[in-house]
Image (cartoon, rainbow, N blue to C red):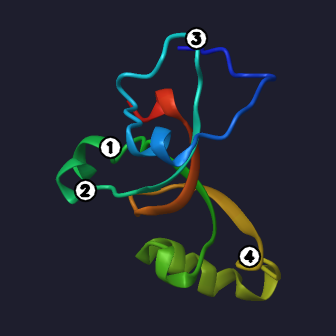
Amino acid sequence: MTYDLATDSYEWLTEEELLSFDIYNSAPGVSYILEVDLHYPSNIHHDHNDLPMAVEKRHLGLEDLSKQQKEQYKCMQGKLKHTFSQQRLCLTLYDKKKLVVYVKNLR
């Protein structure tokens, strides 16, 4: 699916509008970009395991590697200088904090 994103006429919502905001009943022709905390319940991890729904930029550590990846890392450690110093885009099942997302992606 593709959606048209807003290109001008941006407005902040008032406190009243935020309190009554409903992602399922937004005005037609109005788009929203939200900053949200996303909780990923464990009961849907199996269904989303192949393709989690929210990407995040994060630093990977040794604890994020599988057993096989850790063994390969040990063998190549002298050749890998900047392996864990850069951020990567990752699809994970972790909860997300301050995720910026288009409202239609939350539906």
* Residue type marked 3: Gly
Badge 4 or badge 1: first in the primary sequence: 1
| Camera-side mark, 4 or 1 | 1
Q: Give the quadrant of the C terminus.
A: top left
Which residue is under mark 1?
48
* Residue type marked 2: Pro
Badge 2 or badge 3: first in the primary sequence: 3
Q: In front: 28, or 16?
A: 16
| Camera-side mark, 3 or 4 | 3
Left or right of 52, for residue 30 = right
Badge 1 or badge 3: first in the primary sequence: 3
Which numbered circle lies on residue 29?
3
Which residue is under mark 2?
41
Q: How many labels does the image show?
A: 4
Which residue is under mark 4?
83
Badge 3 or badge 4: first in the primary sequence: 3
Q: In front: 28, or 57?
A: 28
Name the residue furthest left: 43
